[in-house]
Amino acid sequence: MRWAVLVGGAGTNLRAIIESGLPVVLVVSHRAGVGALDIAAAHQIPHAVLLPREFPDRLAYDRALVDLLRAHGVERIALAGFLRWLTSATIEHYAGAIVNLHPSLLPLYPGLYAIERAYADRVLWSGVTVHFVDEGHDTGPVIAQVPVPRYPKDTLEQFADRIHAAEHQLLPRVLWALDGGEVWWDRGRVHYAKEDDLWMYGR
């Protein structure tokens, strides 16, 4: 499969994806000057910036995004730090082929600042979720999750580092499972080639 990764930050998850060997053919950022673009360039992967302010609305942005993805023959999309809600223009074209990484055990702490909110609530456990993308906000069907503890003496930075380490492990594994047909989305639910595979639980 030909993958695009949509980014917007430092790119640590992008690096984990690339280093896993997944065939990434395009990296797109909604922000200029971010580390993820440098990582794409270092690995000689085509990359582009689509700035929201250059488009009249979200639909126009997504239409341009789909045109760019199609021009590169993209078949699957991974969101890794891409902080924009996709519209039907993208989701319908790539139905069941877009996955998102979120730093909590959804449905807990959807949206922004999930790590900070969980830390402020002094949870004992949070985690990482990879899910298919629908038109809701972090509401798509869950593919895999891994729990991450918050220890009593953790600083926010220590807790966040543990979450990010789990992200770097889980996301490439899920993307490879999708690439190999081990998991798919059909008629609103997630299907697994082997329902007892432990990778879906982050193991």
Image: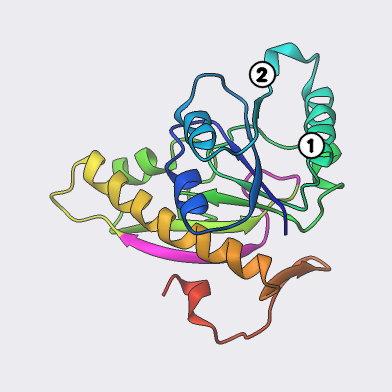
Relative to 128, residue 113 above or below = above
Residue at point 46%, 38% (across, down): 11
Secondary structure at numbered mark 2: loop
- Figure quadrant of residue 54: top right
Residue at point 62%, 48% (across, down): 138
Q: How is the image coloured?
A: rainbow
Relative to 117, residue 103 above or below = below
Q: Is residue 105 visible?
A: no
Frontmost of labels 1 and 2 is 2
According to the picture, the residue beneath numbered tag 1 turns out to be 87
* The magenta segment: 135-148
Left or right: 202, with 191 as reference point:
left
In front here: 43 or 91? 43
Image coordinates for residue 168, horizontal then vertical, percent: 42, 54
Q: Amino acid at mark 2?
A: Leu
According to the picture, the residue beneath numbered tag 2 turns out to be 51
Image coordinates for residue 176, horizontal then vertical, percent: 59, 66
In front here: 169 or 26? 26
Residue at point 83%, 37% (across, down): 71
